[in-house]
Image (spheres, rainbow, N blue to C red):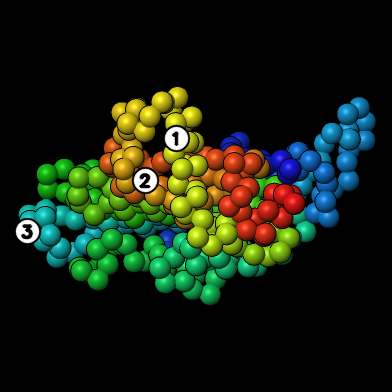
Amino acid sequence: MYKFVFINFRHKNIKIEVMKTIKALLTIVVIATMAAACNKPGKGAIADSDGANGSDISNYEIYEEFKTASANYLCEGDTTFGKDVKVYTTASISVQWPRRFGDADVKALQDTIIAHTFATPKATIDSCIVDFISKPVGYGESALRRVDQTPVASDNVRVLSTNISVKSVGFCEKYVVFKVEHDQYTGGAHPNYFASYVNYDLKNKRVLTYANIFRPGSDDALLPILQDALLQNYYAESMDEVAQKSGIFVSDLFVSHEVYLTGEEIVFFYNPYDIGPWAIGTVEIPVPVSALADCLSDYGKALYDFE
């Protein structure tokens, strides 16, 4: 079994500044060496370090660009909230852009991230970012005028927003996982939020999805497995008790095809409103791969070294 490393980047002495203009994209290049990426060094791993216990350390080189951009606008002529209410809108984005994971070819990964992230994908990540911040909430409904900053929201001021975050959240030598988050505020009671995951097979240059990890028609067999996982996670004796403790609409539980991989688990992910009210947020149901073995496809079994 490969050891999966969760990534939590906290870079000291690195200040990521917001762009001042649409054309000036900020890129920060960080080369991170992650220790203990997998149990055994493979083709992409650097030779073990010398010295005491050096054989326990395996170095794996990651090269990512951190891209951020934002823009603020006044929506001139917008009377959605009343003729005396000024409407502003903002767009911001941050992307951990993969350049290298060991010796793996990441071109297909880059293309997949673009396709998952943007409604109208462009040829390059930079052109996607520029297009995104130039078309915020309110685009096409009123004349947009670029402003340096937005005022504080009040009875006479509405501030709309749309934000995207793309980040790597874990990897091993076999695959890497990226999380894509969208949130948007259009003036309602609360923002709208949803997320998705990109699991990428570094060796085979293939996107890992529910459809190719599991055998066709596995939903019926997986549902009771998810129910058992919820019972264990909430230390409950019944699904009614799960509902009381979690707020999950257990009668609405279904097998989510939005999944992400870890070293020993596959996590079934649910966005707000999928199986519960907005207040409980997202729901994640981690299930040990060993409990899923009978439902895995041949490709899924090979990924986790099941025979």
Q: Secondary structure at mark 1?
A: helix
Q: Amino acid at mark 1?
A: Leu
Q: Which residue is pictured at 59% across the width and 46% down the height? A: 292
Cα gap from disc 2 to disc 3, whole angstroms: 44 Å
Give the SS element for disc 2: loop
Callouts 2 and 3 close, C-beta under 8 Å: no
Q: Nearer the viewer, residue 182 or 146?
A: 182
- The local secondary structure at tag 3 comes to loop
Specify whether residue 231 is in view.
yes
> Quick one: label 1, few (<14), some, or many (20+) residues within 10 Å?
many
Residue type at numbered disc 3: Lys
- Residue 230: numbered disc: 1
Q: Is residue 199 visible?
A: no
Residue, x 44% and y 65% (percent of image)? 118
Q: Nearer the viewer, residue 240 or 285?
A: 240
Q: Position of residue 124 (x, y in %)?
A: 55, 71
The numbered mark at residue 83 is: 3
Residue at 65% x, 55% y is: 300
Q: Which kind of residue does numbered mark 2 sit on?
A: Leu
Which disc number belongs to residue 215? none
Label 2–label 1 contact, CB within 8 A: yes
What is the number of the mark on residue 253? 2
Q: Is residue 122 left or right of residue 305?
A: left
